[in-house]
Amino acid sequence: MFSRFFYLTTCLISALYSLGGYSAVSPQAGSEIGYSTIGPQAGSEKRFHILFTNDWQSRIADIARLQTLLLMEEQRVPPEEPVLRLDAGDFTMGSLFHTITREIGAELQLMKFLRYDAVCLGNHEFDFYLPGLVQMIRSAQREVGTLPPILATNLVFSNTKEDADLRKLMDEGVLRREVIIERNGIRFGLMGIMGKGAGEVNPNSRPVSFADPVQTATEYAKKLRTEHHVDYVIVLSHSGVFFSNGTWSGEDVELASKVPGIDVIVGGHSHTVLYEPIFVKHVPILQAGAEMHYMGKFVARKGPHAHVHVEKYELFPIDTNTPGDPFVAGKVTQYQKEIDRLFLSKTPYRYEQPLLKIRHNYSRTVDDPVLGFWVTDSMRKRVQADIGFTGNGTIRDDWQIHNGGIETVADLFQTVPLGVGVLDQNPGYPLVRMYFTGKELKQILEILLFAYQSKKTMDYYPRFSGIHFLYNPYRMFLDRIFRIEVQGKEIDPTDTQRLYSIATTSYVGGFLWLIDQLSFGLFHVEPKDVTGKPIVDIREAIVNKNPSSHDITEIKAWETFIEYMTNLGEKTPEGYTLIEASQEAKRIPMVEQRSLDPRTLFHHATWIQWTAVGSSLLLLASFLGIFLSMTRKIRKKLFP
């Protein structure tokens, strides 16, 4: 059993790492990964400039300031040196603007107005399913005509009627596998890669899929060099990089290390703010954070051995210190009016409507539980569940005191903006409620804990309401939790009878069917309804807004959050809700307790912990036996 256990857990680690596409490489001195010196260097090659962004997330309220920065930086470039404007995907989904992207394609319209040379697809471009992506592109075309090239190099069609309209966009050259840009005597070859991790959190893209990033990039880098004779190969990569324990890792690191012929990677997806490029085998990896916080500038030329030599790299904050371009600002104002007309007119809200007043900042960091509590508590109370749960990655905004601490409808929507209905196709994930036994609840928590600690990214940090649990990292992983409280009462994590309800979104809830798969059969978790009957489809778990009706009306997470927050505090004379965090909201729900106390090492331990401890004792006894045997032999030789 011990060997089987370690085989399975090793497989689980590998599987979870592959989901994120990690490739751990240490940036130690002398290695081929790390930061490189940036500065002038003699050479005959002409310089080129890249102005880049990534992960707009529909945060286009400040895009007029981005245009000002783009124009200012282009004006500083000598006329003989080419400039490229590039974006690495996820330009949509993350604010009220995306709610009308199918109708008007505002993000792609702005790409045209801002004269982007190319953009790649990110996972969020598929959030409204394939028809939504096609509608967004066609709507933008109707408004502005030709769009910047949209790169999707490793997109694999199913050749069925479901992706016929998307294939037509590829046939028309709107979507492209590659693009060649010749400017000022320099030929640039560009491709757009969707990373494995981004593809796997992208269920709405089916039936299309994505080919292996490394194999595809290798094929197209060679093609761009040998067939198109480009001077530079640039990859727009929606994949990501991560830094942990002195190590840069991630799929962009893997691309740079394994694919010959790449000159520059303009990355996205991980929302990493790179104040300096990462260099892997002399290939610079760039990324400018997310959510319209930064614009990046990259200046380079060919250096020794045909490697790119970086002469300048800078991130420019997009903030109130930069005035907005009047033309683009006017377009954004028009889009806001369209949001009120096309989307919010069906609700009690308007885009700029002030709702709350805050006196403190609230963030998505591990040590600040308040915002995560409010989001999950709103879901829990709305559907009357025992536990509210989501992942940190679904919470898309921090709350910083600005404009006197006033939070508008747009601000609150931006906190939980993601998704589309399962039944109605309207913006926003619906709420679901599912039931689990105490034993299953512990198994779910163990997987969530392990996934977060393995992934090394804040997106996987779980957020809760109605539950509090303690775990001991000295215990065997997947059996570290030794105390669970639901609604303030300790539960029995071995109980297979009593049911506890979990409220979450349809997106997050869908992953609860994967616990068996992620644990390689070590756990068995089965979502149920209130009677204990197994639920086989997420549709069965959707909570009906009108229980008396046979037709199901979805309860949207974003509306639930706004309703919850506007009723959380007292009203000010101006009509705002004054918000203060309660002690319950400030309590960390997932607490580490390092201890060798047997009461925490073995309390509610399963066979996983007992097997690990027993096997360790047997191993120790074997080593001790070998040591004693060798000692006796040595003594006999020395003292016959």
Image (cartoon, grey):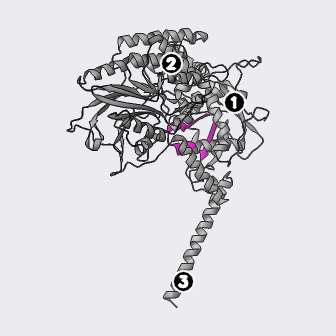
The amino acid beneath tag 3 is: Lys
Q: Earlier in the sequence, mark 3 or mark 2?
A: 2
Write down the residue under mark 2: 137
**Quick one: SS at disc 3?**
helix
The amino acid beneath tag 2 is: Ile
Do callouts 1 and 2 mark residues in contact (Cβ within 8 Å)? no
Image quarter for residue 71?
top left
Q: Nearer the viewer, mark 1 or mark 2?
A: 2
**Quick one: SS at disc 1?**
helix
Examine the structure image and report whether residue 20 is included in the region drawn in magenta. Answer: no
Separation of disc 1 and disc 2 at Cα?
A: 29 Å
Q: Position of residue 353 (x, y in %)?
A: 51, 12
Write down the residue under mark 3: 633
Separation of disc 3 and disc 2 at Cα?
A: 80 Å
Compared with residue 33, is residue 424 higher up or lower down, i.e. above or below?
Answer: above
The amino acid beneath tag 1 is: Ile
Q: Position of residue 448 (x, y in %)?
A: 60, 41
Write down the residue under mark 1: 538
Q: Earlier in the sequence, mark 3 or mark 1?
A: 1
Q: Which residues are magenta?
A: 451-476
User: Is any part of residue 366 visible from this angle?
Assistant: no
**Quick one: SS at disc 2?**
helix
Dot 3 crowding, Cα within 10 Å, few <14, some 14–19, many 20+ = few
Residue placed most toward the observer, 71 or 344: 71
